[in-house]
Amino acid sequence: MAAINPGEVWLVDFGMAAKVRPALLLTGNPASDELDLVTVLLHTTALRGNRWELGIPKSFLKPGAFHLQQIQTISTVKLERRLGVLTAEEMHHVRDALSQRLNL
């Protein structure tokens, strides 16, 4: 697989129940001695209006939000294709919101 980097948004196959949807990579390529896993933050269009929805409008995403309650670690084989990338400022906003969510 080509290099993958934190801040990239990929179309990910989460299986039948969660379907194929965009997700933000929070981690990049695992090292050769690590499991072939990445941690992602799911994007949703089914908004509930709660405090854990982080809207970051991007031309390559449908209107929606990254849901800070939906952090998952998945195999890299589930990554289907790269949709785009968040800016450094947007990633800083994501990290701040995750820090609040995880009480770090």
Image: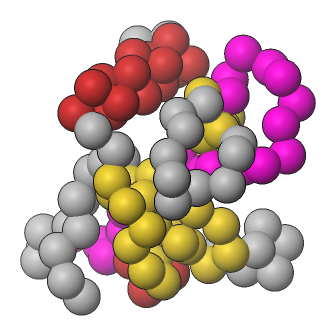
Residue 72 seen in the current view? no
Q: Quadrant of the N terminus?
A: bottom left
Q: Quadrant of the C terminus?
A: top left
Q: Nearer the viewer, residue 38 or 60?
A: 60
Q: Is residue 55 above or below residue 17?
A: above
Q: Nearer the viewer, residue 65 or 34?
A: 65
| Residue shown at the point (24%, 68%) measured from the top left | 4
- Percent coordinates x, y for residue 27 in the rendering: 29, 52
How many numbered circles are shown? 0
* Left or right, residue 55 beside residue 73: right
Q: Is residue 98 left or right of residue 95?
A: right
Q: Position of residue 97 (x, y in %)?
A: 48, 19
Q: Is residue 76 magenta?
A: no
Which span is picked out in magenta? 34-53
Q: Is residue 49 magenta?
A: yes
Would you place residue 46 above or below residue 10 in this image? above
Whether residue 14 is visible here, answered yes or no, is yes
Q: Give percent across and percent down for residue 89.
A: 27, 26
Residue at the spot 51% in from the left edge and 53% down from the top edge: 59
The structure residue drawn at horizontal position 78% and vertical position 67%, both measured from the top left corner, is: 18
For the residue pair 44 and 76, the one nearer the viewer reads as 44
